[in-house]
Structures are given as C-alpha cells and as structure tokens.
Image (spheres, rainbow, N blue to C red):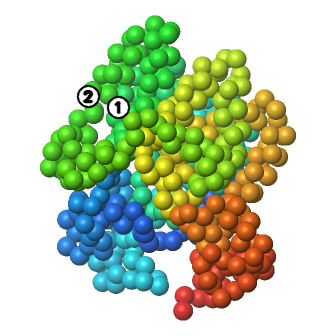
Amino acid sequence: METKIKSITNWIIRHKGELVVLFVFLLFAFGYNIYRVQGDGKLYYALLERTLNIPDPESAPNFLELGFLQSICSFFNMPFYLAGYAIEKMLAAPILLKGITLRSAFINIASNFYIGASIILIFKILAMLNFKHRISSVLSILFSTSAFVAAVVMPAYNHAVDVLIVTFFIYVILKRERMLPIKSFWIGAVYSLAIASRYFNFVLIVPLLVMLMIKKDYSRIKYILFGFFSTIWILPVLFYYYNGSPFNPCFSQEAVGNVIHRMTLFPKYTFRYFVHPLHGLFVWSPVTILSAIGLGVMPRDKKEIGYMFLAMWALIVMMNGYFFEWTAGWSFSNRYLTGLFPIYIVGLAALAEKYGKRIVVLAAALTFYSVFLFFNWYMCVIDGGWGTPWNMIEAWQRGKFFYSTGKELNFRVFCEMMYEHSRYKYIFRGFN
C-alpha cells in the first residue's frame, strides 16, 4: 500500500505541470461551457446526426447552402454524441437543464476533451525541447487565443479537433529524430488527417519536406510520402459519401462555384489576419507576438525547428489570405488560426527560455488583456461578429453594452454578469 501511494505521488510530481493547467482549464471550462450548439456549429452538429442517421435529429439545416465543411470532425465527436443520446433514451428524458439536451452537452464535453488532450501533448512537446517555462506558456496561449473559446463556447465546430490533430502532427514531427526512418510513415498519415480536419492544413508539410531535402534525408521523405498516399484516400471517400463525388469538397456544385468565385488571385487578406482590429491575431491575442519572436530566437540546436514552425505559421495565414471571409465571422481573435495553438506555445516557451521571468510577466499582462477582452466579447459588451477592442474602450467610456441589457456598464455590473454567465451559479442557487 505504501509503495502504491509513493508511486502515485511520484507520478503526480512528474506530471504536475499538466495537472495544474488541466485543473485551471477545466475550472473555467465547466464554468462557462454553453452546453449547446450555435452558429456554424449547428451545421457540423446536423452533419453528425445525418452521418448517424438519427431518427429524431435536433438540427437539420439546408446543406445546399454550405461551402467547405470538413466532415472528419463528426467522427471525432460521434462517441460523445452517442453516449449522451444513449443516456437520453435510457432515461426517456431529453432535457438536461434549461432546454439543453444531454447529446448537445456531450458535444461540448468532447471539445473540452480534445483541447485537454492537446494540452497533455503540448507538455510532451515542450519536454522534448527541454523548455522549462511550460505552465505559464501553455496557460498564456490557452486563454489568450481562440483555443479556450473553441473548447467552451464553440462546441461542434471543428476547431477543437483541429487543435488536437495539428498538435499531434507537431508531436510526431519532433519525435522523428528518435525514430527509424520507416516510422516517418506516421507523419504522412497524421498529415492526411490534418488535411481532412481543415483543408488549408495541406501547407503544413511543405517546410518539413524542404528542411529534409536540404539535409538530403530522402529516406524519411520517402516514408512520409508513403504514409500520406496510403491514407489520403479518406478524403475522396468522404467527399463521395457526403457530396456525391470524390472530387467535390462542397455539398453542392453551386457551393463550389460560389466559394471559388469569391476566392482572390492574390492572398490580399494575409496581413489583416495579424493586425486588423476586427479579429486580428496580434490585436486580440498580442501574446502571439512574443511567440513569433520566440520562434526566431530559438536556441542554436533548435534553430531549424523555429524556422520550420515560422514557415508553417506564415503559410497557413497566407492560404487563409485568399479566403474572402477573413473576419472569421463570430469569433474571438481569429478562429481560423486556432490550429496553430502548439506553434504559439513553442514560440512563447522559447522566448521565456531565453529571457526568463521578464517574458513570463509580460505574457501574463498580455494574457490578462485578452481574457478581459474575451469576457467583453462573450457578454456582448461589444458585438460578437464586428466588435473590436476599440469598441470595447468606447463601450466602457459610454457605460453602455452593445446590446441593450437595461444595465449601466461598470465594474460591479461587469462582475455580476460574469457570475450570471457562469454555470457555477447553479451550485449556489440550485437548478430551479
């Protein structure tokens, strides 16, 4: 018994970083989970119910109106949906609380789970890189960017799944040096999954292949490509199943034409993803500026990793720069860049490694700004789709919410509304 207790204690000590971050994440997640699907999440949710051929679906939008909708997310969320649906049928009671069904609540839990799994993976990545400031780096990026939002208020969207897949992709890439070349097959296999998660992820492999070509590591390139071509068949199969053609990434030819017609010949929206007040990454999540700097000043033995991650970051933003809907609609920061979560963390941890506590303190201050902005966005102090940080300042100057609440905007009311939006209020009030 004593040996078992000692073993458990040692395990907790070894993994205290992951446990601390997971505790903080889940504390806020369970407090602010919406436990229902909304926005484009309804489309993904309906796609899931269509895939399962549910006889009593909750959501059934017109799929002919859809553009790109990556269906792989449905398969990740499927076990959670089925668990909630099965419990509903056993209890013969579809309503959980305040009109929220168990199945939609379980989809929210799925998003929590995938971001939680990503946190565990990113700690393994930071351990491989021998970076010390792991807890502060992960917490800063988690609460500064749209990763937390993807887990909590955007269930059924594909962003939480995308974060997990891209984080695993980064993990497998970094692990390659410890693997035989033949095991690089898994890099190609996970790469296929990343493309199925979000189509623009196809650019992620380019910096790695260029780096391997410079090193003349053709053996690894061969197995990576073998892994890719052995698994990419999943994409045309999904296209055929959902869209009627293995070459059609949209739900209708009309949607294909509409999307392509509105794409630009030049990635003219690229810089807006960084600096535009409307969901620009550096404006809403300025801690990522430190991440970009950190990737450029990685330790000498990790320089190529930093440059590779910077190239991945740049290529993802550039590809999104062709896309007409660069604002990302209803979004905290820019949700189209959520998948870069592990790259942001590596960059911030690298900068903290080089400059120590000064960076940790600066990152904490920038994180506080983003968290405050999040609650202003979440509680409609500013418009969720078109509000900017400047609008937040104006709202506080006027003492008025963007949407009329009948209340004056001040610090006391703001704190009261944070409590009202929290699920923990039910603990104190009961469920009536």
Q: In the image as oriented, which residue stretches furthest toward the right?
A: 358
Residue type for callout 1: Ala
Q: Nearer the viewer, residue 216 or 258?
A: 258
Q: Which residue is mark 1?
A: 189
Residue 155 percent coordinates (x, y): 45, 63
Compared with 388, 203 (above or below) is: above
Q: Which residue is mark 2?
A: 230
Q: Nearer the viewer, residue 71 or 387?
A: 387
Query: Pointers 2 and 1 in contact (CB under 8 A)?
Result: yes
Dividing the picture into quadrants, the one containing residue 293 is top right
Q: In the image as oriented, which residue stretches furthest toward the bottom?
A: 432
First in residue order: circle 2 vs circle 1: 1
Question: Quick check: can you spot residue 21?
Answer: no
Q: Residue at x 25, y 48 (%)?
A: 257
Compared with 143, 172 (above or below) is: above
All told, the count of numbered labels is: 2
Q: Which mark is residue 418?
A: none
Compared with 399, 173 (above or below) is: above
Q: In the image as oriented, which residue stretches furthest toward the top?
A: 216
What secondary structure is marked by label 2? helix
Residue 247 percent coordinates (x, y): 19, 40
Q: Residue at x 42, y 83 (%)?
A: 99
